[in-house]
Image (spheres, rainbow, N blue to C red):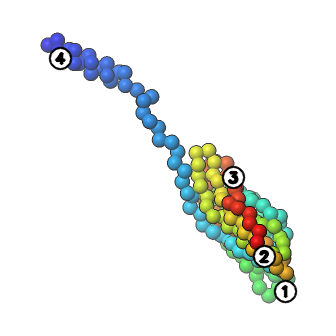
Amino acid sequence: MKKVIVFACLFLMGIACSSDDNKIVNPFEPRQVEMETILIGTDTDDLRLIRRENRVINDLESWQVFVNAFTNGRPDFDDGMDDNPFATLLENAIIDFKTETVLVVVDNIGGGNTTIDIVEVMEYKDQVVVDIDRLYYGIAAVISQAYHIVKVPKINKPIVFGELFDMHF
């Protein structure tokens, strides 16, 4: 009988003394965020007069301001024959700002061949990092501007843009 009481006491003490403090908490594992391209390119049209920038858009009003700036407020080309494809694509983009965020990278307007790409969006414990690949590959006689616009699932963390490298050839 004493053995049963001793075992019962030891069992109860073992349960009472156990704690969650000894458990190993798994650290946050960085993860790649899925992105969907809305518009990407390098164009020579004079439609955009916006500066080189990285922008995070979280609401419809900010999106409309961006679309207006990106298309220079013109729904049509100067010749009036065709609709502005940028305005049409951007205005018709399906974006749910309750669940999605738009990320925009735009390069300088310049006389050269350039590309700009959002290569990867990674979520870390305290922030989201957007990796940008900006490539300059020669001088051209035409004025051009590169851009990449994507949408990603909404994440309530600060978003930081980082350049992979800035190459000039």
State the quadrant of the C terminus: bottom right
8 on left or right of 90: left
Mark 3 or mark 1, earlier in chain? 1
Where is residue 59? Give x, y as percent.
70, 57
> Gap between marks 4 and 2, in whole Å?
86 Å
Residue underneath mark 3: 160
Label annotation for residue 4: 4
19 on left or right of 5: right
- Depicted 67 relative to depicted 14: above or below: below
Q: Residue furthest front?
A: 169
Viewer-nearest of discs 4 and 3: 3
Query: At label 4, which amino acid type do we have?
Result: Val
**Residue 74, can we see it?**
no
Mark 2 or mark 1, earlier in chain? 1
Query: At label 1, which amino acid type do we have?
Result: Asp
Q: Residue at x 70, y 55 (%)?
A: 161
Q: Secondary structure at mark 3?
A: strand
Residue underneath mark 1: 79
Query: At label 2, which amino acid type do we have?
Result: Gly
Mark 4 or mark 3, earlier in chain? 4
> Gap between marks 4 and 1, in whole Å?
96 Å
Query: At label 3, which amino acid type do we have?
Result: Val
- Depicted 32 relative to depicted 143: above or below: above
